[in-house]
Image (cartoon, rainbow, N blue to C red):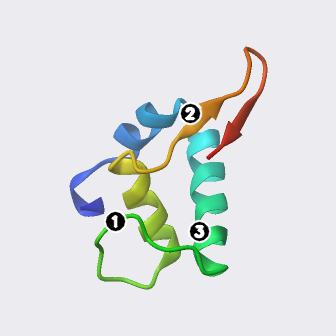
C-alpha cells in the first residue's frame, strides 16, 4: 500500500509535513507499546504501519478547537 502513495498525498491528508511526522511518530510509539494494527500489512516496521494507517485514513488529526489540534 505505501509504495502506491506519495508523501505529498499523505501530507494532504493531515495538512502539513510537520503534522504527518508527528502523527506517524505518535502512532508508531503506540504500536511499539502494543496497540493493535488497524491495517493488514505484512511488516513489523511500526513507521510503515503508521503511514499506511494514515494513507488509508484509519487515523487522522482531530481538531479540538480553532487554535489547537490533537492526534487521535
Q: Residue at x 30, y 74 (%)?
A: 41
* Residue designated by label 2: 16
Q: Mark 3 and mark 2: span between their CA atoms?
A: 18 Å
Of 35 and 48, the residue lying toward us: 35
Q: Residue at x 40, y 64 (%)?
A: 38
* Residue designated by label 3: 28
Circle 3/circle 2 CB separation < 8 Å: no
Circle 2/circle 1 CB separation < 8 Å: no
Foreground: disc 3 or disc 2: 3
For numbered disc 2, what is the local secondary structure? loop
Task: List the single residue furthest toward the top.
Answer: 66
* Residue designated by label 1: 39
Q: Give x and y (percent) for residue 9.
A: 35, 38
Q: Mark 3 and mark 1: span between their CA atoms?
A: 13 Å
How would you rate the neighbour count of disc 3 (Cα within 10 Å): few for under 14, some for 14-19, many for 20 or more? Answer: many
Q: Is residue 7 left or right of residue 29?
A: left
Amino acid at each position: 500500500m505505501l509504495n502506491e502513495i506519495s508523501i505529498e498525498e499523505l501530507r494532504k491528508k493531515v495538512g502539513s509535513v510537520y503534522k504527518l511526522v508527528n502523527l506517524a511518530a505518535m502512532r508508531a510509539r503506540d504500536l511499539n507499546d502494543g496497540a493493535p494494527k488497524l491495517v493488514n500489512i505484512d511488516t513489523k516496521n511500526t513507521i510503515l504501519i503508521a503511514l499506511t494507517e494514515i494513507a488509508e485514513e484509519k487515523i487522522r488529526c482531530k481538531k479540538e478547537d480553532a487554535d489547537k489540534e490533537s492526534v487521535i
